[in-house]
Each structure stands twice: as C-alpha cells, then as structure tokens.
Image: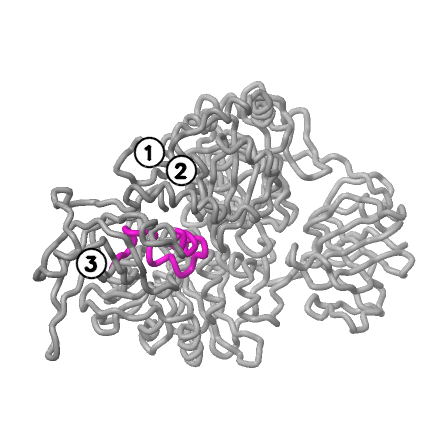
Amino acid sequence: MPVQLLKIIKGKSEIPLPSHLQKEDLKNLQEGFDHTNKYFQGLVILSYPLTKLRDGTDFFKVVLQAPSLHWLENQHLLPLSPPDSTNSVTVTEQQAEGCRSYLVILLVTGVSRDLDNSCSQINSINILIYGKMAEDCAKVIQHGDTFVVAGFKLAKSPTLREDGRHGCHLEVSEEAGSAIYIYTIPRATAASETASVSVTPKYVYTPLNCLKDGTIVNLYGVVKFFKPPYVSKGTDYCSVVTLVDPSNVKLTCTLFNGNLDCLPKIYKVGDIIRFHRIKVREYNGQMQGITSVGFASLTFDGTVGAPIVPRTSSKVYTFMDEEQKTIEELRVWAASNLSISGPAVKLSGVQPMLFFDLTCQLVGKAKVDGSSFLLKVWDGTKCPYPTWKVPVEARDLEGEKILLHQLRNLTVDILVYDNHVQLAKSLKIGSFLRIYSIHPKQASADNEDVSQIEFHLHGGTCYGRGIGVLPESNPDVKELKTFLESVDLADSQNMESMSSVELDGTFNSVTDLESHLRRCQHFSVTVLTDHQDLNNTELKTILNSTAPQQYRIRAKLRTYKPQKLYQSIKLHCSKCNSLQEVPDGDDFDFILQGSAVTAPNPELHNTSWYDSVTWTTQDQKQRKIAIHFVKHDEMLQQPEDTLLMIEGGTLKEVWKLTKRFKCVIPVRSTEDDLELLDLSAPFLLQGNIKYYGCKQCSTPKPVKSLSSIAAEQRPSWEPTEIAQVLGIEPLQYVFIMKFTLVDGTGALNAYLFDYEKFFHIPASEILTSNFLQQKMQMTMNTLCPPGRKLDDLPWLECFIKSYNVRDEMKHQVYYQIFDTTVAEDVV
C-alpha cells in the first residue's frame, strides 16, 4: 500500500519500516547521489490544495520540516549551526529562549547564509506527490503529522529563490515505486483504520488570564494593536498582534510564516482573532504567543452586526455554531471597552504632521533607489495642500499612462522606505490598500500659503507602520469603489493650481527642466534665512574690502566644483576643525578581515547587559563569529530598537544586520572587555550611514560603557549619545563646494560648507542614496543650468562672509556662503 497511516504505540511505530531503508539527513539530499534505499522524515508544516495538472494527473504539494535543535524545533524555527566545540559558549535553554527572535531574523534574512554558505541553515523541503498517491495523501494529512517518504526522485527546486527552502525537491508517485508512511497526530477517525475522514474535533478555548508558560492552546481575542506583515528576513514574513479579552489581560503574539497568506488577515484594531495551536511562553513576567507546529488562524470583522465571515487562506477549517456567539459577545465587549479608532482619514482631511491611515487604490509605482519606493494612490478626494511629486523618470513609472494623466490632480505620491520596499514592489496596479501610519510632512517654507506636503511611510514597524492589501470583498473597499466610480474626472482637470509644484510636480524630462528654468530666471532660486536688514552689495565692492565682514549679494552661479557631486562629501571634526575624505568600503572590509584573526573571547559572552550567540563557519577559513544583543531591563528589545555588537563578521554580513537592527557596532575581544576597532573604521552603523570618530580628538573607552545607556528608562541609541559614552569625538558629514559667483561687476569664489540646510539633504545620506544624488544634481542643474548663456542663468540671493587665512608665506582672504538655502520650489 503506497500510502500508509501508522500509529505510535508506547513510543514505537505499530508497523516498523522495511529493514532495508536507511534514514537520510536533509543536508545529504543532493543530486548525483544514490537514494534508492533511503527514506526522508520530517514534520508536515504546510500543505497546498489538491490540484490537477494539464494532463489530468492529480498533484499535491507538502512542505516538511527536518528535525533541528530541540529548543528551535519546539518553536518551529530554523536550526543554528553547531557551536564550536573548542572555543565557544554552550547555548543554554534560557539563553536560547532570550535570543530566539534574533536568531530567527538572522537566519531568515540570509545573514547565516553569508556567515556560512555550507552550514545546514535550511530546514524545510518541498515534496511533490503525483497521481493516486496525491489523492490519498490529501485526504488524510494534517499539519503536525510525521511524514516518511521512500523511493523518491530528487530534482532541483525551481522555487528556491521564492520560498528559501532546500535547493532540491522530492518527487513521489506510485509509478516510480514510492512509498509514504504517515504517523498521525491524535485524531478521531471512523472505525476502519483505512478511513480518511476525521471527526470534527471539539476545541477548548483558553481565556487570556489562564495562559501558562510552555503550553499550546486555542484562544480568541480582540485586536488592540497590530503590525501588518513585513519581511523579517529573506524568506519569512512576520506579523505582530496584541490581543485582549474580557479578562482584561493582553497577549502579544509574534508570528512567522514563509507564506504571507498564512498569517492572520488583520485590517484594523477591533478585529477578532481565533488562534489554534499557538504556543505560550513567559518572558520577563509576561506571557507571549508564538507560532508552533500546526498553527492556524481565523480573523473576523469586529463591527457589531457585521456578517460573521472568517478571513483565512486555508481551504479546510472548523467553525462551530457556538463560536458565532463567542464572536458576537466579543464584539459587544470591544465596542464598550476598547478604544477603536474611527474611519481612516481621507486625503481631503489630511493635516500636516499628523500621522494617519489611508484606504486607497494603487494607480502607479516606481523604484526610486535601493532604500525607497514610490506608490501613487488616490481615494477620490483631493488633498487641500500642494503635494510633493517624487522625481522619477516617466519610463520607470508603472501604471496606465492615460489614467495617471487623468488622475494627476487627485493622486498623491507616497515614498516608502526600507523594510516596506519589498512588499511595495510586489503590489499590483489597481489593488486596494490600507497604508498605516503615513507621515504627512510639511516642507519648510517662508510662505505657508505655498508650502507643500510630502507623504512618507518610514522604515521599521513602530506604531503599526506598514501596508495591507484589502480584498474587493472588504466593506471599506466596496464603499471606496462605489465612491471612485462616482468621481467626475473632467471636473478634476479644472482644479489646477498655479503653484509651480502643482503644474508638473517633477522633472521627467529635459523639456520639463527647461520649462522650470524659464520660470526661475526672473526670481531668486535661493532663500535667505536671516539678516534681512542687510542690503545687497556688489561683488566688486566686496573684493576691494577688508576681512572679516558679512554681505548680502545677488549673483549668478557661473561654475561650481566638484562637478561629480558625490566628491563634495567630506568628514569634519568640529573640535579640531580638520577635514578628511570619507573612507571607502574596501578600507572597512580590510579592517574587518584583520579583526577576524582574533577569535571571540568566550569569557566576555552573556553578561548582565547583553546576550551572545557564537558559531564557527564551515568554510576553509573557519571564522569564529559572535553577535552580542544588548538588553534593556533584562529583556531583548524589538530589532528596530536594538543595538548589537559583532565580532568576526565580513562587510556584507555587517550590512545585512544593519537592515534589521537599529544599530550595529563592530568590536573585537581583549582579555578584559570588548573594544572598538581602529577608528579608521566606523564606530557605529545605523541604517545606511557609517559614523566615524576623529582619531586626534577621541579617547576610546571600553565597550562596557554602553551599559549606562542600556540602563536608561528609554534607551534611544542615538549616535551622539553612543559617541559620548564611548569617548568618541564624532566626525560630521558635510558638503564642501566652491561656487564661482558673478554679478556684472566682478567674479568671486565662495565656499559652501553645509551639513543639510542648503540643499535640504543630509550630507550623511547622500553617498548611499541614488535618489538623493539625483535630487542634488537636479538642484545644481537649476542653479547652474548646463550649456546656457550667462544672461539666461537664474539669480541667487545669498549671504557670504569674508575671513582671513594667514601662514608664514602669505595672507589670503576667503569667502563662505552662510544662512542661505535653496528655494523649496527648486528642490
């Protein structure tokens, strides 16, 4: 019998497997090897609906999880590489519990894959079943069953990049002589042992005030807070939800799954959740929920009187009649006891600086740079403020061009960052979205009547930031679709604003830029931020005057240096006033390689203020790597709030960590403490920014000095605070440029020394953002249009100050621009 259901009796199989079969480990499943007399065993963690191929053959797909370390297996998590037996700290159960969420993130982001390409971090594999065996398996299999397959064929998996599972899959069919043995989890069946229809179980639901550590339970709860699913790693999605119930106890659950559809479909606070087989653990005196083997969920609208229709991707689930009463009671309780926000804000009701949720339709999208992505959306209403249009090339913008043109006065541009980018890229044009915690930032301007609003969805997941895709069956979507269909697009074309930001919004071509420059010729493209009492002075007069003095001028920018704008970024020490070039990545990588020669000191691991995880790579270099997660109140924080320290990592590995954690500090071991690397390397990495210290003015302190910040009530891990406790004098990123200014009476070279005010761009971010470099180049093309005659150049109003520079050989007068910024309608 190709498919056999077996029982475990007193710890042993009721029918032993054939004696000629030998167990095969996941890591040994490779093409070219003989697996004739081998079998593979794993737990069923995912199964797909039974389907038919084009030729009519039945097809069934199952995902098996291989056995792993005990404490990770219980959590349905990935395994860690075996600790180094000669120079490593043993990972205890308690330490493993504390570091679990971070290990998962590391492994799934692919950090572990880079740390050790040959270690067995993959712990799941796809099983493809064909023909009669597919039909038989689909009838009897359940999540959590132990699944044994023999007589299989091994083939390359075409979905490796998408699902992150084993590079091969197993193909099974009766024609190939395959056999499947299923050790079932306890269930009620009909009298015949070969029967496959299960009796509907009677589930018991545990109130939140009765949860116990280490148990796996079923429960109901009302959503008090949630984070929409986000990519926590290269393959898995993560969702966080806090539930409450009439017992007045809350439970925060952190849920992982490689399939986005398998996470709860939560749309708003007040939704009702049913969890089956969720594991409860106690951490720092509070109960937490995490996914376990066989985890499943249903979500219901929490509105009193709404239809009770479960949201789930599962084709098979149980829902008893008495559970409708439970949902209705929770709805009534939540309406009286839970602060549920009203309907999401419309674009017509947006208020600057007040974060809001938006239900909208996606009509366009475009890649901006590596860390940001553009979404063009509308909800049928018009924002009462001029809105910023993100500068992208027309050819890069996805969406129906005619519709985008028709809706140009009703759409807004939302720029999404960091961890939201991957999901944003996958969104389909025309889909309906709920975007949570949008920041409507008001651009600074002297005249509030022409100020504009920029819409940002910042990185991270604080305050529930994220993007949710709503089905067309959603009541809010039905209401929105009806409203959008009623909008008269002809009327919207008459709502043109005379503001320059409303005319075209962005420079999509040279023609657009030329048009914009013509508008700029007769007024200044810069703004004075102080000293309005000063009168204009001709450059000829300034050149004939003694220094130091301050002046107000009106001139044109004839030339500027450097022409390659990224070369204008330098590092400046405000204490010794020194300037230096920004080190390149190769220098940093070389320093990291040198520090990896010194192995981590196990005596410095797992202190009172940080938890440590160590392992040895399986490549030829046998690198020893340690990551230290800084705790707060004896508890590990969420990744976006966490500082960690790494020893022995490569540059690629360090950058991967910065994408998931707030701060990363490269360190090395001494006999007594961890210490910073050479100050030629950054002392801190945060996001895409590397922070450097001045070698001359810094007096580095031991890394244990950071424990004082960890002990604060709300550690912010700000770079300036970190630098201070570590004895580092931080270097600041600055723009250094030379402008040649002319006004008809003379020509003068003035230096621009600016951190972020002149261009409205932080100098610290320009080197890592193609979008900001493009924005800066467009600004300079406006101030000094290439190929244009002097008479056609726009006027700049700015303040300059003269100062003396003397040495033993000569005395010179220099000029510097100050208290001046580029006009908002230019940038």
The magenta region covers 753-778
**Residue 490 rendering spot, x and y as whole percentages:** 54, 23
Which numbered disc, 3 or 1, marks the residue that appears first in the sequence? 1
> Mark on residue 746?
3
Asked if disc 3 and disc 2 are in contact, CB closer than 8 Å, the reply is no
Q: Is residue 167 visible?
A: yes
Q: Which residue is at 56% across, 62% downward?
A: 110
Q: Which mark is residue 450?
A: 1
Q: Residue furthest right?
A: 175
Whole-number angstrom distance, CA of label 3 to CA of label 1: 35 Å
> Which residue is at 27% across, 51% downward?
757
Task: Give coordinates of residue 382: x percent, y percent.
Answer: 46, 27
Give the camera-side residue of 130 and 493.
493
User: Element type at marker 3?
Assistant: loop
Q: Nearer the viewer, mark 3 or mark 2?
A: 3
Q: SS for tag 1? A: helix
Q: What amino acid type is highlighted by mark number 1?
A: Val
Q: Is residue 707 visible?
A: no
- Eyeballing the image, is 478 above or below 19? above
In three-dimensional space, the C-alpha distance between marks 3 and 2, rounded to whole angstroms, equals 34 Å
Amino acid type at image mark 2: Val
Disc 3 or disc 1, which is closer to the eye?
A: 3
Name the disc covering residue 501, or none: 2
Q: Is residue 315 toward the left or the right of residue 503 in the image?
A: right
Task: Specify whether residue 512 is painted magenta.
Answer: no
What's the residue at 46%, 36% (across, down)?
A: 225
Q: Say what amino acid the circle numbered 3 marks.
A: Gly
Callout 2: SS: helix
Magenta stretch holds residue 774: yes
Please identify the quadrant where the N terminus is shown.
bottom right
Q: Residues within 10 Å of mark 3 (few under 14, many from 20)?
A: some
User: Is residue 766 shown above or below 213?
Assistant: below
